[in-house]
Image (spheres, grey):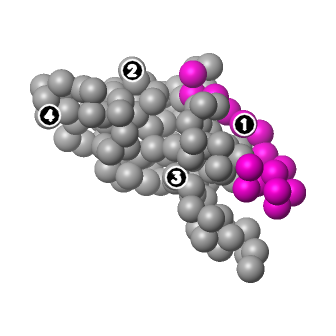
Amino acid sequence: MKLYGIPNCNTVKKARDWLTINAIAYEFQDFKKGVADKVLLTDWLKQQPWEKLVNRTGMTWRNLSDTEKSIVIDSASALNLMLEKTSVIKRPVLVKDGQIISLGFSEQAYKEAFSIK
């Protein structure tokens, strides 16, 4: 299992802590180290709509110009943005066997994903 994100993101820290406390093994993949390449992001876009993968409430999105925001209208334009600015990707992304099992972090969603009461 792989957890994709940015180490200093509070939401990623919560997810990492939760996985550790619940003794769930994972490999952390840091977006800042180039792990989000075109092949990976294209695969994710086949699994999730671009509207869910692009975090339009985060600082990276809010710091884009109106022109930059206006050209993100489909998967292809979202892919270009995510490749250029990996911080715009919703995080963390939890992946098992190549399949996204969770976007973002919610304790309830993680409990359900791992069948923990």
Marks 1 and 3 sit apart, C-alpha to C-alpha, by: 14 Å
Q: Considering only order in the chain, which callout, 4 or 3, is on the residue closer to the N terminus? A: 4
Q: Which residue is mark 4?
A: 70
Q: Which mark is residue 28?
A: 1
Residue 25 placement, left or right of 33: right
Marks 2 and 3 sit apart, C-alpha to C-alpha, by: 20 Å
| Residue ID at (56%, 36%) | 9
Please rate how many residues cluster around mark 4, counting C-alpha atoms within 10 Å: few if below 14, some from 14 to 19, many from 20: few
Secondary structure at badge 4 equals helix
Q: Considering only order in the chain, which callout, 4 or 1, is on the residue closer to the N terminus? A: 1
Location of residue 81 by image quarter: top left
Residue at the far front in the pictured view: 10
Location of residue 102 by image quarter: bottom right
What stretch of residues is rendered in magenta?
17-32
Q: Which residue is mark 3?
A: 104
| Residue ID at (65%, 49%) | 14
Secondary structure at badge 1 equals strand
Specify the amino acid type for callout 4.
Ser
Specify the amino acid type for callout 3.
Gly
Q: Which residue is mark 2?
A: 84
| CB atoms of marks 1 and 4 within 8 Å | no
Marks 1 and 2 sit apart, C-alpha to C-alpha, by: 21 Å
